[in-house]
Amino acid sequence: MVSLNKLQKEVLQNKLDKGFNTTDIFKEFCLIHEELSEACRAHYRKQNDVGEELADVAIYLLGISEMLKINLEKEILAKMQKNKKRVYKRINGVMTRVKEA
């Protein structure tokens, strides 16, 4: 399996090779939002391309991470460990964090 760190570098290199934005982080956040909306719409309409739209979201996320010099793989693993230690309880029908371990 390819590491996210390697994919980040490949995504950024592809953006550079194709002449896409690699400096305007705000623009990238706007574009990832658009891609996420497309994935949501595809799911809502029961279209076949939800996976492709989610891939677009992931590609933008990897690109932003590389542009910001963030090791996304490391951050995801750390966050997953943090989430495993949290305790939630349903309060008034809403899952609410009640303990931070």
Image: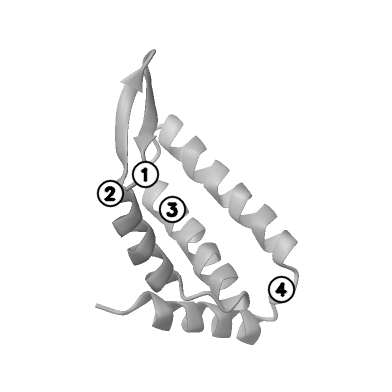
Query: Which x, y percent locates residue 67?
Result: 62, 76
Say left or right for 69 vs 46: right
Residue shown at the point (51%, 77%) measured from the top left? 11
Say left or right for 66 vs 55: right
Whether residues under marks 1 and 4 lie with C-beta atoms below 8 angstroms apart, the answer is no
- Label located before the other in sequence (1 or 4): 4
Above or below residue 15? Residue 60 is above
Instruction: Give the spatial CA distance, label 1 vs label 2.
Output: 7 Å
**Element on which disc 2 rests:** helix
Return the residue at label 4.
Answer: 21
- Label located before the other in sequence (3 or 1): 3
Quadrant housing residue 63: bottom right
Instruction: Give the spatial CA distance, label 2 vs label 3.
Output: 28 Å
Above or below residue 76? Residue 49 is above
Instruction: Give the spatial CA distance, label 3 vs label 1.
Output: 30 Å
- Label located before the other in sequence (1 or 2): 2
Instruction: Give the number of callouts.
Output: 4
- Label located before the other in sequence (2 or 4): 4
**Dot 3, how many residues are within 10 Å of its Cα: few (below 14), some (14-19), or many (20+)?**
some
Return the residue at label 3.
Answer: 54
Query: Which x, y percent locates residue 15?
Result: 61, 78
Return the residue at label 2.
Answer: 85
Return the residue at label 1.
Answer: 100
Residue shown at the point (73%, 75%) measured from the top left? 23
Q: Amino acid at mark 1?
A: Glu
Quadrant housing residue 45: top left
